[in-house]
Image (spheres, rainbow, N blue to C red):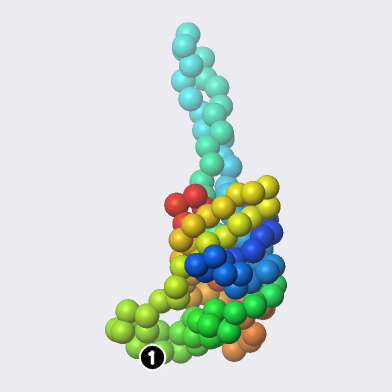
Amino acid sequence: MITETSGGQAYRAGELVAADVLVLEHVEITKVRVLMPGGQTGHKERSIRHPSSIRFESIDDEALYKELVELIAGACDVARAREQRDRRWEPRPLDLILDYERSLVGCRLSRPFEALRVAPEAVAFPIHHEQL
């Protein structure tokens, strides 16, 4: 599996909320046999995308910080996660501007898979976007 790392910034409504983020994109490349003309076989590469994650190196917005703490709390406590689900709570989407002027609008965060009660800067949060 290959992990591609991109640095960048996170925004909400044009306001900078995190000046330094890392997006980790996990891709697995496999080779598959394909039948070629003339009865010969060849190989074709196929990529399989795995869930991507984001790590916040710095958080500049108090509302985002509170949302990340709430996600960690939901990952650590099943009752808290159910309460979040029942009230349909989720963090507001983020807009990311990554290296090489790649921008992703409307990225959604979810609860981390392995969370301890630590600072949000120490946790990689799963991120969802159609281009990831």
Residue at x-position 49% and y-position 50%: 131
Q: Residue furthest front?
A: 14
User: Which SS class for mark 1?
Assistant: helix
Circle 1 sits on which residue? 79
Where residue 128 appears, x then y in whole percent?
47, 61
Give the vertical position of 84 relative to 26 (above or below): below
Q: Residue 124 in the image: x percent, y percent?
A: 60, 71
Q: Front-most of 28 and 95?
A: 95
Picture quarter containing residue 20? Answer: bottom right
Q: Is residue 68 above or below residue 43?
A: below
Q: Is residue 29 above or below residue 95?
A: above
Q: Quadrant of residue 30?
A: top right
- What's under tag 1, amino acid-wise? Ala
Q: Residue at x 64, y 49 (%)?
A: 101
Name the residue rendered at 45%, 52% in the picture: 130
Left-right relation of 37 to 119: left
- Determine the residue positioned at 48% across, 62% down: 107
> Is 34 positioned to the left or the right of 87 in the image?
right
